[in-house]
Image (tube, rainbow, N blue to C red):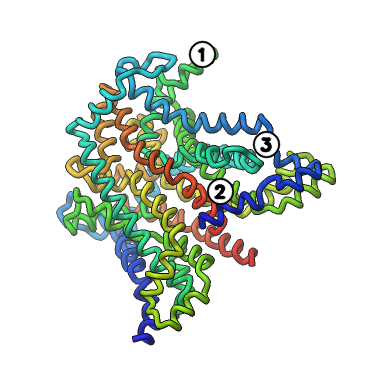
Amino acid sequence: MTTVSMTRPASAGPGSPQRSRRRLPGARLWEASPLTYLALIMAIVLSIFPIIWSFIIASRKSDAIYEYPPRFGDLLGTNLSNALNNDDAAFVLGLANSLIVSTVVTISVVFFSSLSGFAFAKLRFRGRNALLLITILTMMVPTQLGIIPLYLLMRELGWVGEIQAVIVPFLVSGFGVFMMRQYASSAVPDELIEAARVDGCSTWRIYWSVILPALRPAISVLGVLTFMQTWNEFLWPFIVLNADTPTVQVSLRILAAGYYNTDYAQVFAGTIIATVPLLIVFFIFGKQIIGGIMEGSVKA
Amino acid sequence: MSRWDIKYSPYVLVAPFFILFGIFGLFPILYTAYTSLFRWTLLDGGNHQFVGLANYQRVLTDDRFWNAVFNTVGMFILATVPQLLLALVIANLLNRRLRARTVLRMGILIPNITSVLAVGIVFGLIFADRYGLINWLLDLVGLPTIEWRQHRWSAWLAVATMVDWRWTGYNALIYLAAMQAIPRDLYESAAIDGATRWRQFWGITVPLIRPTIIFTVIISTIGAMQLFTEPYMFSYGQSRGGIGNEVQTIAMLIYQTTFERTFNVGLGSAMSWLLFLFIMIFALINFLLIRRSVRGES
């Protein structure tokens, strides 16, 4: 999936040499003028500004918040450590919990999605199309709407305030299954599977030695998207967890509720703590994420 | 072993997904329909009373529910129309020969990966009623400042801005992917016929990526119907969504009804189910569109 999307823009891409040499009026469409760059850079500045803004606020004293124009201060470290050491918000615990939750959910979603995706793409079985249809339909179902009975279920299980309450309900994803199915369909030739069968490979063996390696690019995209989505989840953790077992978003909510009117700078330091891990992931995997979004949309 | 393997392994492979989805996805939604028929609160100690459709009747005659519907739909329109138009423009800009292509795309996408809650807090201050950044800028250019939370229109505008900030770049990349699939020859022959770039954009690009546009409209609709965190943080973490409930969405009302105030599970479930039916209609349309576009390809 990623490889396809990364090569496609280049090959079909704007202005292959012969075309621009022909100097048709239409060929100019694909040239980027300085204005194009200017407009795009403006859009990017607007995109990045609120993040920079939170750094500015978090680097100053709280009572400097109404001073304009805003400038960077030198208290970023102090405010970050205030937020990290705030006992009510328990950010360190929140970060650790979020890391655990996001990692477990990611591994599970990737594993089960690749299993089902493999079956839907490459195996023949009765009811396959109907089951695939159901899988696609589950993508349309907003989980938020089942939140009330899910909460009742967690109460029955005694999981309210326990970290598994934000893990177990999210171990599978219809989107993931569909994505893996699409990728496996195009990335793994049927002949390869036939050949493995002739060699006496079991289905599990084929999954492990043929499918899984071939799915690797799609797995990294799905993994990163799932990780970030889980990290960002707010409403459900906020409902089912409490101050003793927060995720990082719950910590931030506690901090914002308690200190919004008294210590803005610390709250904004909190927003940085919640966001920076995502930014790091984004800077490492940005290219794959973009490829995944673009390719996924075309396939969907 | 081999025959068993070929016959039953596929079911073993897909089973975990269906079992887990059944328990944590399907069951809760069906159970919502059940609880909506009872007088049922989180505090009633298991003493639930069957009341038939009384909860639905109460919801449908409740002004607060219709206020929440009005807010949800209003902010959806206010956010989605400029968002998708702007995304089209940005996609069109990105669909050229560019240096540093990946950097530009990443810059556009950054808002989408940030923490929604953090963004809500940051924008809450940017749109602060008195000394916010926007008011400072308005003052700087000699315009009157706005107390954003005091009027419905301004509160909607602020929340819509948050939503747009987050989703415009994402939609732009989806449009860009669709635009790249359009054959270049179409533009060349149009250019020979003397069509301006503007004409080419509206005459070729937009019609040809129409299925993608419809797709994003529906995805945005499903997302917007469940809008919670942005308006919640904009009202400083109050589920009533402002003193006059100016930005209280359906999701916020469901939260307030079920997990605050009266802890009324029955009433909250009825609201959820109404919202769910509403979204299902859009999902069905979505599915039909996807099926049609797939068939069109082959």
Residue A243 percent coordinates (x, y) = 19, 40
Q: Which chain is home to disc 3?
A: A
Residue A189 percent coordinates (x, y) = 52, 71
Share a chain, discs 2 and 3? Answer: no
Query: Regarding mark 2 in the picture, which secondary structure is present there?
Result: helix
Lower sequence index among marks 2 and 1: 1
Would you say the residues marked 2 and 1 are in contact, meaning their CB atoms lie under 8 Å apart?
no
For the point 37% across and 26% down, the residue is A55
Q: Which residue is mark 1?
A: B140
The amino acid at mark 3 is Ala
Q: Which residue is mark 2?
A: B174
Q: Which chain is home to disc 1?
A: B
Dot 1: within a 10 Å radius of its alpha carbon, few (fewer than 14), some, or many (20 or more) residues? few
Residue A105 percent coordinates (x, y) = 31, 55
The amino acid at mark 2 is Ile
In the image, farthest residue toward the left:
B45
- Which numbered circle lies on residue B125? none
Left or right? Give the position of A158 relative to B3: left
A64 over B76 or under it: above or below: above
Residue B47 percent coordinates (x, y) = 17, 57
Left or right? Give the position of A297 relative to A10: left
Query: Regarding mark 1 in the picture, which secondary structure is present there?
Result: helix
Q: Which chain is home to disc 2?
A: B
Q: Which residue is mark 3?
A: A32
For the point 73% across and 41% down, the residue is A29
Front residue of A253/B103: it is: B103
Front residue of B293/B44: it is: B293
Q: Is residue B54 visible to us here?
A: no
Query: Regarding mark 3 in the picture, which secondary structure is present there?
Result: loop
- Nearer the observer, disc 1 or disc 3? 3
Dot 3: within a 10 Å radius of its alpha carbon, few (fewer than 14), some, or many (20 or more) residues? some
